[in-house]
C-alpha cells in the first residue's frame, strides 16, 4: 500500500514555473488568471504567491504519476490539504485554485505574528510554548516542532530555547499561522468555503487538524488556519492503516523526509517512477 503526499509552504523552487508550463500549460494559464498575475516569480515574496505556485506545481507533477487513484491515502501539509483534496476529486480544479488563491491572500495579509522552529520533542516544545505565550503550530516529526504567536514573543522564546540547549530559529514568515491569531482569516476563509461544493474524495485524504481522513472539509479547512498541523501523527496513522510506501508529489522532498524521521522503516519512492529512494 502506498500514499501520495503533497507539500506546503516553503517547498517552492526556481524550476517550478518551467515545469508547470511544460506539463500543464492550461493550469499555468488558469493560475495566472486566478491570481491576477504570474505568481511564480514572486513565490518567495509572500504566501499570497507561494501557495498557488506550489499548488499548481504539485498538480502538474501529478499528471506524470501512474495510477494515483490506486493510492491507499493522500496527505497534504497545510496548503497541501487543498492540493490533495483537488487531486482526489473532492474539489474541481477551478474551485481548488479559487480556494488556494483566497487562502494565500488571507494568510498573506496576516502580519501580526511570527513562527519559530524548535528541535526537540513535542512535549518539551509544548512546555516551551506555554511558558512564553506561544502555541504549537506544527508537530512535523520527532525533533521538529514549530511554535507560533505574537511577533514580540518569538525572539525571547528563541533565546530561552537556546539557553536550554535547544536549536531554535525564526521562520521567514510574517504571520502566526496555525494559531489563534489567524481567527479573522479563518472566519473569512470559512465564508468562501461555504460557497464551494465538495464531492466525496476518490482516495481518503488525511486532515492535518485531526490526523484522520477528512469528514467535513468545509469546516475542517477553515479550522485548520488556527489549528496545529499534526504531520507526525498523520505519518503514524497512515502506517497503522497499512501504508508502507510514501511518495511526494510536488517541489522538494520535505514531507518524505519528515516521514523518514517519524517511522522506523518507511519505503520512500519517486511517484513518477517506481524506484525506492530510501
Image (cartoon, rainbow, N blue to C red):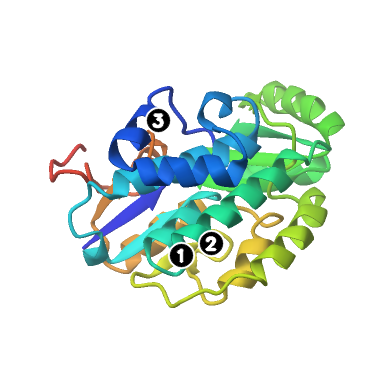
Quadrant into which the N terminus falls: bottom left
Mark 1: give few (<14), some (14-19) or many (20+) Cα within 10 Å: some
Mark 3: give few (<14), some (14-19) or many (20+) Cα within 10 Å: many
Quadrant in the rendering for residue 243: bottom left
Q: Which mark is residue 95?
A: 2
Q: At 59% across and 34% down in the image, what residue appears? A: 37
CA gap, disc 1 to disc 3?
A: 22 Å
Residues under numbered marks 2 and 1 in contact, where contact means CB atoms less than 8 Å apart: yes
Given residues 162 and 11, the one toward you in this image is 11
- Report whether residue 248 is seen: no
Q: At 55% across and 44% down in the image, what residue appears? A: 33
Q: Is residue 143 above or below residue 179?
A: above
Disc 3 secondary structure class: helix
Q: At 67% across and 47% down in the image, what residue appears? A: 136
Q: Which mark is residue 16?
A: 3
- Report whether residue 221 is seen: yes
The residue wearing badge 1 is 92
**Sequence-wise first label, 2 or 3:** 3
271 left or right, relative to 214:
left
Disc 1 secondary structure class: loop
**Sequence-wise first label, 1 or 3:** 3
Q: At 67% across and 32% down in the image, what residue appears? A: 116
Q: Which mark is residue 41?
A: none
Given residues 164 and 278, the one toward you in this image is 278
Q: Is residue 242 above or below residue 28?
A: below
Residue 50: x, y in percent?
56, 35
- Name of the residue lying farthest toward the right: 152
Q: Mark 2 or mark 3: which is in front? A: 2
Q: Mark 1 or mark 3: which is in front? A: 1
CA gap, disc 2 to disc 3?
A: 22 Å
CA gap, disc 2 to disc 1?
A: 5 Å
Amino acid at each position: 500500500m502506498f500514499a501520495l503526499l503533497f507539500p506546503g509552504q516553503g517547498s517552492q523552487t526556481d524550476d517550478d514555473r518551467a515545469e508547470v508550463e511544460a506539463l500543464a500549460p492550461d493550469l499555468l494559464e488558469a493560475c495566472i488568471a486566478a491570481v491576477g498575475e504570474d505568481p511564480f516569480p514572486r513565490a518567495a515574496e509572500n504566501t499570497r504567491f507561494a501557495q498557488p505556485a506550489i499548488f499548481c506545481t504539485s498538480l502538474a507533477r501529478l499528471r506524470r504519476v501512474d495510477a494515483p487513484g490506486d493510492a491507499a491515502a493522500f496527505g497534504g501539509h497545510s496548503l497541501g490539504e487543498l492540493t490533495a483534496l483537488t487531486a482526489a476529486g473532492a474539489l474541481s480544479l477551478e474551485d481548488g485554485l479559487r480556494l488556494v488563491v483566497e487562502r494565500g491572500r488571507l494568510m498573506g495579509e496576516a502580519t501580526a505574528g511570527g513562527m519559530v522552529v524548535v528541535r526537540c520533542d513535542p512535549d518539551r516544545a509544548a512546555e516551551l510554548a506555554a511558558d512564553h505565550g506561544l502555541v504549537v503550530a506544527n508537530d512535523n516529526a520527532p525533533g521538529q516542532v514549530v511554535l507560533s504567536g505574537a511577533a514580540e514573543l518569538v525572539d525571547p522564546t528563541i533565546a530561552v530555547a537556546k539557553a536550554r540547549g535547544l536549536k531554535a530559529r525564526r521562520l521567514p514568515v510574517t504571520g502566526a499561522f496555525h494559531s489563534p491569531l489567524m481567527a479573522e482569516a479563518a472566519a473569512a476563509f470559512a465564508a468562501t468555503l461555504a460557497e464551494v461544493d465538495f464531492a466525496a474524495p476518490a482516495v481518503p485524504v488525511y486532515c492535518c487538524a485531526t490526523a484522520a481522513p477528512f469528514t467535513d472539509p468545509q469546516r475542517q479547512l477553515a479550522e485548520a488556519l488556527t489549528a496545529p498541523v499534526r504531520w507526525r501523527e498523520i505519518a503514524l496513522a497512515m502506517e497503522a492503516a497499512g501504508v508502507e510506501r510514501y511518495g511526494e508529489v510536488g517541489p522538494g522532498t520535505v514531507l518524505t523526509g519528515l516521514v523518514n524521521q517519524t517511522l522506523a522503516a518507511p519505503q520512500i519512492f519517486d511517484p513518477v517512477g517506481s524506484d525506492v529512494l530510501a
